[in-house]
Image (cartoon, rainbow, N blue to C red):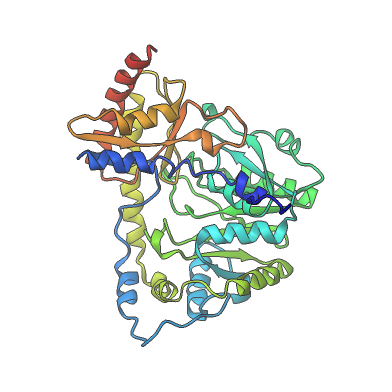
Amino acid sequence: MPNPIRLSQRAAIMPASPIRRLAPYAVAARAKGLEVHGLNIGQPDIPTPEAILRRLREYKAPYVPYGPSQGLPEYIEALRTYYAGVGAKLSAEEIFVTTAGSEAIQFTMGALCDPGDQVIVFEPFYTNYNGFAALNSVECVPVTTSGADGYHLPDRASIEAKIGPRTRAMLICSPNNPTGTVYTDAEIGMLAAICRDRGIFLIADEVYREFTYDGKTSRSLLTLEGMNELAIVVDSVSKRYSLCGARIGCIVSRNREFMSAILRFGQARLCPPTIEQFACTALTEVPASYTQGVLAEYQKRRDVVFSGLSAIDGIRVRKPEGAFYVCTGLPVEDANAFAIYLLSEFSLDGETVMVAPLDGFYATPGLGRDEVRLAYVLEVPKLERSMRILDAALTAYRAKVGA
């Protein structure tokens, strides 16, 4: 008898994206003529810097060749200049260009972990960490944070209690997706101390580095003392320069053995995108006024969304400190069912809203069932209408289910 045809265990455990799994409902809603305000995904509508678009238009080569596995030298030099501006002096060998931040995280997990090893994450966390872990047969071990204190870190003992013999690393994101939390210097220092004492790596997803509000700042892991062998930064141009479709990220580390392994990983996939790297060599020409304008716009959007949510009866919300997301508890039992209701049954003046249920951002079963993440990536008038739609939809939905 032949063996039964089956897929791998890895395929069986690969999670669906809670950010994208409701897309068919949105397609159906738009087919009915509704305008769907997409607050489910972090796709900025801010224009890309003109310097980068101009460089893109300047590409004149008669064909598009493979580039070096570690990235174009001229783009790596642009990144060295950028990181010097955030206080990190780096050599070219300490930067490796990836196909977006996604590949950066996947390569990092693969280089640090054997199948069955564990990475500490702080939930709720960027949902695709689960997917990257599954691809590497790695387990995400959650440390739970609470919206009651703005999703800041628990004490050292609570974190160390989750470290076991197969723990290889901690993975953090600050400013945070999905919570908007910005970890303090003391919190970052505590995690660094734990990793030094326990001999585990500290991986920092710093994609939203510049997105901090109300005078807060975000300290890069690259500026910490005594972490050269243990600190790894994964990064991307997607949010910083509104270049989500360019798929350009990077890994930064001063650990030579780790970076040597990453180079071999990169050689197996040949090279990151050539034309997009060429365009991004212009990032050093982006004026400071661009970032300042983007921050002012997002802070205005955050304030509109926070004010709108705070006025809705039964909502639980804390003001986010950074990134462009807010997590909010809803007065419903099942946020997934409510999200589907928004797209399939409800509209207000021909409009509705798409949200991301938060249960998929947790590793602990049962958490996040009544929570959603909203991305305030739309213009203020659309955000104002979205808040009115959510208010009306919650009232109608709760009447429907008998809440």
Q: Say left or right for 87 vs 391.
A: right
Q: Is residue 225 visible?
A: no
Closer to us: 279 or 33: 33
In this picture, is 255 found above or below 73? above
* Residue at the spot 55% in from the left edge and 63% down from the top edge: 87
Displayed quadrant of residue 389: top left
Q: Is residue 202 above or below residue 321?
A: below
Q: Residue 17, percent across and down?
A: 49, 44
Q: Position of residue 336 (x, y in %)?
A: 44, 30
Please state which of residues 276 and 84 is positioned toward the viewer in this rendering: 276
Nearer to us in this view, 129 or 336: 336
Question: In the current view of this chain or complex, which residue is farthest to the bottom?
Answer: 62
Residue 361 in sight in this render: yes
Q: Position of residue 140 (x, y in %)?
A: 66, 44
Up-down: is 142 above or below 264?
A: above
How many numbered circles does the render carry? 0
Quadrant containing the C terminus in the rendered view: top left
Image point (42%, 75%), residue name: 281
In the current view of this chain or complex, which residue is farthest to the top?
A: 402
Residue at (60% x, 65% y) in the render:
252
